[in-house]
Every structure is written in C-alpha cells, then in structure tokens.
Image (cartoon, grey):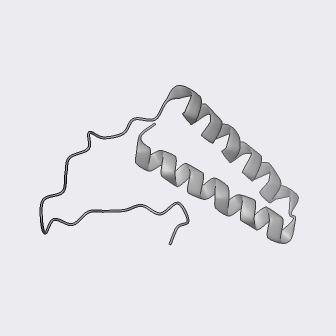
Amino acid sequence: MDARAFVKLVSDMMATQADYWRDRKQSDLIKSKDLEKQVRKALRDGISFPDPTPAQEGEDVEQISLFGE
C-alpha cells in the first residue's frame, strides 16, 4: 500500500470511530473495526513511501491531513 492510500485509510478509520463515539450506532462500530483490521494489515504488509526529494525554492509542497481538513 502506498503512503497516500494509507493516510486515507487511517483518516476514514478515525472518522468512523468518531461517528461511533458520537452516535453509538452498531453499523459504525462494525465499519470501524473493519477499517482498523485494514490498517493493521497495511502496517504488517508494509507501506511504500516515495523517495523524498527536497522541495526547490518556490515549489508547492502538498501536505495531507489525517483529519480530513
């Protein structure tokens, strides 16, 4: 799994966990547990990160938030 997909997966897991704790819906708990299993599997299998290259002056650098902001 690449880093971008992993960040998305963790973000989805955290959002679903927040939904569960807010509303206590069984469906959110089930989805949350499934996403957590996927995160654990990704951690076991490994995550590929692109080779870091330093940003050049004036170059835009993209940041990815785990919180979907």
- Residue toward you, 23 or 48: 48
46 or 31: nearer the viewer: 46
* Horizontal and vertical percent position of residue 7: 50, 51
Q: Residue at x 46, y 47 (%)?
A: 5
Residue 20 position in % (x across, y down): 80, 63
Q: Nearer the viewer, residue 57 or 8?
A: 57
Above/below status of 30 relative to 16? above
Residue drawn 46% across the image and 36% down it: 1
Residue pictured at 49% horizontal, 30% vertical = 46
Quick check: 16 left or right of 11? right
Residue 17 drawn above or below residue 48: below
- Residue 57 relative to residue 42: left or right: left
Give the left or right position of residue 32, taking residue 39 as reference. right
Looking at the picture, how far across and down is residue 57, in whole percent? 12, 65
Question: Horizontally, is 56 left or right of 16 in the view?
Answer: left
Identity of the residue drawn at 41% across and 40% down: 2
- Residue at the left extreme of this rendering: 57
Task: In the displayed orientation, state which residue is furthest to the top.
Answer: 45
Number of numbered discs overlaid on the protein picture: 0
